[in-house]
Amino acid sequence: MIDGLPYKHIGAVKPGGSVCVCDHASNFVPEDVPLGIPASLLDTHIAVDIGTAGVVGRMARRHGIPAHMAQVSRLVIDLHREEDHPHVVPTESDGHLIPGNIGADAEARLDTYHRPYHDALAKWLDAARPELIISLHSFTPKLESGGEQRPWQVGLLYNEDDRAARHAIRLFGEEGLNVGDNEPYSGKQLNATMNRHAEAHGRPYCAIEIRNDLISNRADQSRWAAMVADVCGRVALALD
């Protein structure tokens, strides 16, 4: 982690513009957190939202959408869960046991990673006064533990506030994409960061899930960064 912080910022905030949040951007595991899993699993979707760091970095550097990005793996602490969520320190993910997390000191990890991440995000958003928050995630085409193939190329998640999502669903659809409406997960259940930092403050947001096989290389990450920036720019205009 840079400077020991569980987050980093890319790009300068311009008050009143759009910003991006990426809770699962990193697969980094600190040396003092023994997960007890094969190193190969750190390159899979259980440890990191594959491709999101590349997309978000390009959105910040090329499209002027500054980003707040995680610098610690979701297997260490899931920053996209409430503090009291039973899986905030996951002991299993998609059929893989995480033995090092069984009996782990969750309170210590909350203090070290989760609370600093969200405290910094709150201050960053207060300073940004954003017209739109983009929350970017990726999802695997099919879970190892079972279930159907996921056909959506992109999904929009929301809980109570669907103002921005409705516009984004339409605009991504106009790009010829198969768009999930609260798919592959429902924002009614999995929306912790946006519930806390967007809905609780009346801030419009787009919680976007991109299928990770579509953003696995630099060229595709660049293409999706441009498309997300364009669609969300038009969403922001529609909300004015």
Image: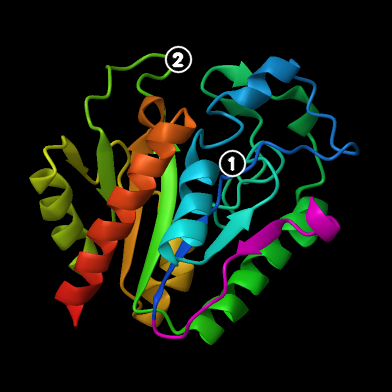
Q: Residue 119: horizontal and vertical position, in percent?
A: 66, 73
Q: Which residues are magenta?
A: 1-16
Question: 76 above or below 169?
Answer: above
Q: Quadrant location of residue 63?
A: bottom left
Q: Where residue 22 appears, x then y in whole percent?
A: 52, 53
SS category of the residue bearing label 1 = loop
Residue at 67% x, 36% y is 27
Comparing 205 with 201, the one in front is: 205
What residue is shown at x 67% (from left), y 60% (from top)?
A: 8
Q: Position of residue 98 (x, y in %)?
A: 70, 25
Badge 2 density bin: few <14, some 14–19, many ≥20, Cα 10 Å: few
Residue 137: say if magenta: no
Where on the picture, by quarter, is residue 239? bottom left
Label 1 sits on residue: 87
Comparing 141 with 81, the one in front is 141
* Disc 2 from disc 1: Cα separation: 17 Å
- Residue at the location (38% across, 34% down)? 220
Observer able to see residue 187 = no
